[in-house]
Image (cartoon, coloured by chain):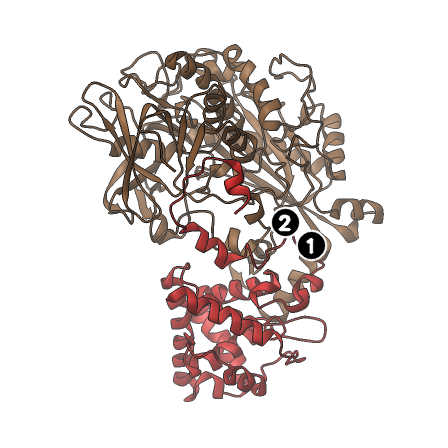
Amino acid sequence: MNQPELYDVCVIGSGSGAGPVIYELSKAGYKVVVLEKGPWYRTEDFAKDELAVSRRDIYSPNLRDERHVIEKPLENGKWKIRSTFDSGISFWNGNCVGGSSNFMSAYFERLKPSDFKLLSTYGEIEGANIADWPISYDDLEPYYTKVESIVGISGKAVPHKFAEPRSTPDFPFPPLNENIFAQWIDTAAENLKWDIIPLPRGIISRQKNERNSCYYSNYCGSYGCSSNAKSSSRVALIHDALRTGNCTVIPNAKVYHLETNGNKKVTRAWYYDAQDKKQSIRAKLFVVAAQAVETSRLLLMSKNKEFPNGLANNSGQVGKNLLFSGGGLGNGYFYYDELPKEDAEKLSAPGLFVNRSLTEFYELEDPDTGKRIKGGTAHFLFEHAVGIGKAIRQKWKGDRLLYGTPLQNRLKQYFTNTRKVRFEIFVDWLPNDNCHVTLDPKVKDKWGDPVARVKTGYHPHDIKVGKLLAEKCEKVFKTIGAKHISSNISGNPPANLQAGGCRFGNNPKTSVLDKNCKAHEVENLYVTDGSFMPTGGSITYTWTIYANSFRVADKIKEHLG
Amino acid sequence: MKRRRFIQHIAAAAVYSQLPLLAKCSVPNKNNVATYIENLPEHSPLSTLQAKNCVIVQQILFPDNEDTPGSIALNSFPFFISVLNDTWRDENENDYLIKGLDKLNDFAKDQYGLDFFQQKIDNQQEILANYIEDKGENWASAMLSIIFESLFANPIYGCNPDEIGWKWLNYTPGQPQPSEQNKYPELIKKRKSENKIITSLEQILQE
């Protein structure tokens, strides 16, 4: 097929930051081309195949070909620098059409109004680059609502002290079915007099057009959905965009350079095609949504005379103030032979969700100063159902390797008599000077381009708040009788919760993007993944990324006229 | 072409899966070893010596007994061969596994003057225990992880025949499970597909 010589919009990436722009602009009649570095996996390609998905990481690039270099802080103040190929720990989150939204667990929460003004609400913290957002919760609220219905979110709105203002009374999709464990958590909440609320999910609970409702496969996180219930950008938005006849998707197109015309305009996106040949696309306007680390990398790689430090980076801000999600996790155990038979049967039922979020401590009292500080949230859930992963965790008893009959007995006991329950804590990852993306000076990808070097320094305040939350979660588990409760709060960056790097703001000297997510320095360049966020809140980011991308799509429509 | 080799070995694994359960004992059995070695794939990444040692190591790490499917019932050895031939995996990881077998054999010869597989059964268990204690713990852990893969992976990969591993642990796998169309090698192939320009949903849905 002949391609247009000039598209209206070229979108780089196809995940949750890209999908709303692709959908809205295609529907509005603009000719949109999408360059996605990964292949197109169809729904039929997805299976709950632990070997392929979890053990061989098949949805991500092979680390031999494409890797990251990660700098992690050590306790002695030095930094450990290692490529992900050497560590074996990938920093990719799924490269294919729809991006990592295909593989998310889809725990969806809105930011609270105070998250948009963290600096003015709670004040400065030494060593952190906290900034208020240039928009308010009210600016984003209509788009949060839009995501609920168009992308698809199930849940139940309940009053609680940090409840976000809503323009609609409830979610368009009712909550998913729950395991008895959710009731136990509710009882604990009642006893403790804490707000623990139903946790919305980006998973639909009844049919929506050709998307079927959730079938409770027990395998959400890391796995593609086989009923299209999970609200990935691919099935929720890109399928409809293609139906308009205005959208073109080029899979296996790895963009490596954005060319400008010497007059602050991007004119062409250069990419490697499936055969590793260099190709280019021309468009009137460009949108980058390659996920935070890779978005910064692309801008930094797009150097020329006009932008000697990288595209939109004459301010030197590209790649700075990268965010992850602070916090950690905790565990508890129930043993079926210690429970009434009926409870044991209900607890062991596979597939049903827990979907509870502790919101009571979104704001906390600092035990050291007595001041009110920003807290966080915690989700209650089950251990992932994967068998190999569970077994691997059983082979060590302390620091001793088990094998033979003792190991087999332990596996039998674990798989037939135990249900491991978990909590995951989300606190702000405070932006700081030691968390950023640069281009590695030595390590290249398979095309010979520099890989992203990610420095993952965290602020000690994140650990302090995380530990306060962990104490609360452990108390919930104690209340319901879980055994062997433990928690681990650390500064390890979860690679699947990335944001920042191209923060938006009103001052071009301290931000990359303006409040509409257009680059200050470039007339026709927008960034719509999580890169725009100056602070991340204490929740997962996907709903906010979807909502902001819908918001920016409206601004782009105004821009294009 | 390396991928072809991978498929050959998957096919070989399927042949092994037709074999009857070879052991109902909790200690290594040299007859089982012999049967395995006779069926080694033509392009085996392991030498005969390495293969013999490997089968015994797997059987000590995860023995078969009356009500527990061990490495023989799970087809862990042919599965291990397919893993070593998998070009998607980091070859350094495979080298590490193979070198571990060699180091174990050196350890056995140093202690008792014979190759590991030639030792008496009690000695094999003692030698492996000592090797794990001495310097082989991480290697044995990696070997166990591959056995766990053969315990939980879909039988389509030539292991876990008749879902014997799942049944043993009352394990409910997620659905759908992989098919011939979307199993692991097919997904690898798809990652390196030809150039495509998608302009309609039908183009994708009718593939």
Residue at 50% across / 83% down in the picture? B37
For the view shown, which residue lies furthest in the front direction?
A2
Q: Amino acid at mark 1?
A: Thr
Q: Which residue is mark 1?
A: B172
Which residue is disc 2 drawn over? A385
Residue ID at (61%, 80%): B27
Q: Residues within 10 Å of mark 2 (few under 14, many from 20)?
A: many
Distance CA(mark 1)–CA(mark 2): 9 Å
Q: Does residue A51 appear in the picture of this structure?
A: yes
SS under mark 1: loop
> Which x, y percent locates residue A330?
58, 40
Q: Are dots 1 and 2 in contact, CB under 8 Å?
A: yes
Image-based side of A523 in relation to A399, left or right: left
In the rendered image, which quarter is residue A119 located in? top left
Of all chains in the rendering, the one displayed in brown is: A
Residues A260 and A310: in front is A260
Check chain identity for marks 1 and 2: say if they share one.
Answer: no
Q: Amino acid at mark 2?
A: Ala
- Disc tally is 2
Residue B160 in picture, x, y percent from top left: 62, 66
Which chain's residue wears label 1? Answer: B
Q: Position of residue B9 (x, y in %)?
A: 48, 71
Residue A361 in sight here: no
Q: Quadrant of the N terminus of chain B?
A: bottom left
Q: Is residue A282 left or right of residue A97?
A: left
Chain hosting mark 2? A
Chain B tint as drawn: red
**What residue is shown at x 53% (from left), y 23% (from top)?**
A375
Closer to us: A39 or A510: A39
In this view, which residue lies farthest toward the left? Answer: A305
Q: Is residue A108 above or below residue A405?
A: above
